[in-house]
Amino acid sequence: MISVVLIEPETPGNIGAIARLMKNFEFNNLVLINPKCKHLSKEALDRSTHAKSILKKAKIKKIDYLKQFDYLIATTAKLGTDYNIPRSPITPEQLSEKLSGLSPKLKVGLLIGREGSGLNNEEISMCDFIVTIPSSAKYPTMNISHATSIILYEIFKKQDKNKSNSHIIPATKKEKQVMMDYFNKALNKIKFTTKEKKQTQKTVWKRIFGKAFLTKREAFAVIGFLRKLQDKKN
């Protein structure tokens, strides 16, 4: 189940427009994290047109609510170099491919940042990976409702209502955390010249595990492998 999560939205019109887009592409779950405006104002309701029901059932939450998702996907126009791993993105098309075979039982949060400043580094670090829309280098930043429309459209195109792989159980947040716990234990036994290099390895592998969308069986295999490495070193 994919939820559209707006971080500290400031403009009622944008919230209403995003609710309308969600209705267009059959997304129903809207979450507002610390909103800075009234999501049920006349402006928001007018912009939502026939998607008022999405606005009315939107969840108003604090940032800790993000911990309940199995996967968090950040959206940003502010990219780094290859060395800036947390801001190394995939495209909406690549995202749609990854989500197309995903079980609806998984809780996936698509994070949309602030109108003015987007997502900060701390929020991006909470996510499994980021997605960005390729646009002109002269003016890469898009309005959040326009950006959301492109991403939701790409996901919608790939959604198959009758999935042939629905019997395959995906790895959840719990399995991902166990993988990272074992990985970190192994990593702690390796000597690095600096703390920064060690942290880079942690960030890289968190992103790899996140982008992979492993099945539960695959996650157990990785956990078993890391456990054997741990036992061997002991």
Image (tube, rainbow, N blue to C red):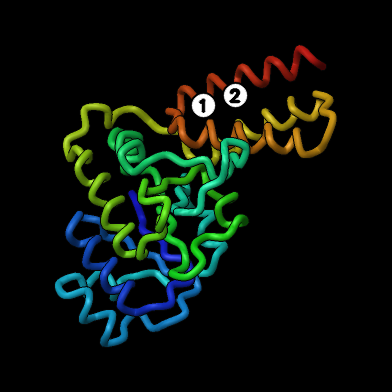
Q: Residue furthest top?
A: 232
Q: Quadrant of residue 162?
A: top left
- Return the x and y of residue 153 as percentages of the image width and height: 23, 50
Give the amino acid at mark 1.
Ala
Q: Residue furthest front?
A: 138
Residue 178 seen in this snapshot: no
- Return the x and y of residue 39 as percentages of the image width and height: 35, 79
Gap in Å between the C-alphas at discs 1 and 2?
6 Å
Using a 10 Å C-alpha cutoff, classify the residue at mark 1 as few (fewer than 14 neighbours), some (14 to 19) or many (20 or more): many
Give me the disc on residue 66. none
Quarter of the picture holding the C terminus: top right
How many tags in the picture?
Answer: 2
* For residue 181, side relative to residue 18 (left or right): right
Up/down of 141 relative to 180, above or below:
below
* For residue 205, side relative to residue 55 (left or right): right
Up/down of 10 relative to 191, above or below:
below
Up/down of 218 relative to 75, above or below:
above
- Return the x and y of residue 103 as percentages of the image width and height: 32, 38
Residue bearing the label numbered 1: 219
Q: Residue at x 39, y 43 (%)?
A: 106
Q: Confirm or deny contact between disc 1 and disc 2 (CB under 8 A).
A: yes
Q: Residue at x 79, y 15 (%)?
A: 233
Give the amino acid at mark 2.
Ile
Residue bearing the label numbered 2: 223
Q: Residue at x 45, y 54 (%)?
A: 77
Residue 67 seen in this snapshot: yes
Q: Residue at x 37, y 41 (%)?
A: 91
* For residue 169, side relative to residue 7 (left or right): left
* SS for callout 1: helix
Q: Quadrant of residue 226?
A: top right
